[in-house]
Structure formats: C-alpha cells, structure tokens
C-alpha cells in the first residue's frame, strides 16, 4: 500500500518518499508546508510518527526514507527512546551507517539532477 500510495501522492504533485522500518513495516512521508509528515495509508494515520513505538510497542532499529531525490536516516523522528534505539542498532557502526546513507543519498541526488 505504501508504494502505491506514494505513487498516487507523486501523481497528484506532492513530494513523497517511502519510510522503511527494518523491523517489518513501510509507510509514506509527504512534504507538506515546510516539513515531512508521516503518512501511513495502512493505518489511516497522518503526522503520527510515534504510532509504531508507542502504539504498537515496536522495538525500532533503523528507519530509512527513500525518494528519487534523497536517502535519509529518519529514525530519531519516530522514537521517544533514542538511547534505547541506539543500543539496538548493531548491524553496522553509526559511522558506517552514515557513510552508506551518504553514498546512497549522493547517488539519488546525482540521478535527480540528471
């Protein structure tokens, strides 16, 4: 649903991206006004970024947002327990993660620039 919803948002002229939660869920983010808003079509929720941690009790690790223009680690926006999340982020070091995201982001930006 999130993929389809993101395509619909783009077709309607909105800037959209997919937020991928490494634990098992994907949703959309839409640029409205001057910021990205959480937008989960499966849950029927808008601007409720704590849905997964507070509502579902998820133990978040990595949430990366992807668009045709950028790749961004948005995990801090979806948690009120950042130190605990950091303790669970053990797949790669935070420095290595930043390098990987920067490389992916650079590729997306170069592709978007044509």
Image: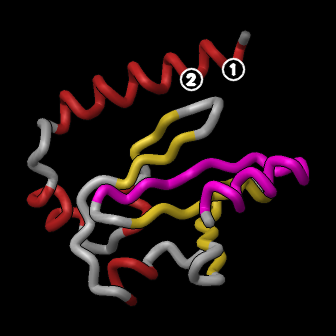
Q: Is mark 1 on a helix, strand or loop?
A: helix
Q: Where is residue 113 in the image (x, y as percent from the top left)?
A: 71, 14
- Asked if 16 appears above or below 58 in the picture, the reply is above
**Residue under pointer 2:** 108
- Asked if 51 appears above or below 77 in the picture, the reply is below
Q: Would you call the spot at circle 2 few (<14 residues within 10 Å), some (14-19), or many (20 or more)?
A: some
**Residue under pointer 1:** 112
Magenta highlight range: 2-22
Left or right of 76: which side holds 85?
A: left
Mark 2 and mark 1: Cα distance apart in space: 6 Å
Q: Where is residue 2 in the image (x, y as percent from the top left)?
A: 60, 62
Q: What residue is at 29 percent from the left and 53 percent from the top?
A: 62
Q: What residue is at 69 percent from the left and 20 percent from the top?
A: 112
Q: In which quarter of the image is the N terminus?
A: bottom right
Q: What residue is at 41 percent from the left and 47 percent from the top?
A: 64
Q: Quick check: marks 2 and 1 in contact, CB under 8 Å?
A: yes
Q: In which quarter of the image is residue 5?
A: bottom right
Left or right of 105: which side holds 17?
A: right
Left or right of 56: which side holds 110?
A: right
Q: In which quarter of the image is residue 33?
A: bottom right
| Residue 12: mark | none
Left or right of 68: which side holds 12?
A: right
Q: Position of residue 31 (x, y in %)?
A: 72, 53
The residue lying furthest to the right in this view is: 12
Q: Is mark 2 on a helix, strand or loop?
A: helix
Decide whether residue 11 is among the magenta residues.
Answer: yes
Q: How is the image coloured?
A: secondary structure
Depth check: 34 or 72 in front?
Answer: 72
Q: In which quarter of the image is residue 50?
A: bottom left
Q: Would you call the spot at circle 1 few (<14 residues within 10 Å), some (14-19), or many (20 or more)?
A: few
Q: Quadrant of the C terminus?
A: top right
The residue lying furthest to the bottom in this view is: 55
């Amino acid at each position: 649903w999130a993929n389809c919803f993101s395509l619909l948002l783009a077709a309607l002229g909105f800037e959209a991206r997919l937020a991928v939660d490494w634990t098992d869920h994907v949703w959309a983010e839409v640029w409205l006004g001057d910021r990205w808003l959480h937008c989960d079509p499966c849950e029927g929720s808008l601007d409720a970024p704590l849905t997964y941690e507070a509502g579902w009790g998820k133990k978040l690790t990595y949430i990366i947002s992807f668009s045709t223009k950028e790749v961004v680690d948005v995990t801090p926006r979806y948690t009120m327990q950042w130190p605990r999340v950091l303790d669970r982020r053990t797949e790669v070091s935070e420095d290595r993660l930043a390098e990987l995201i920067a490389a992916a982001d650079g590729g997306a930006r170069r592709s978007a620039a044509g």
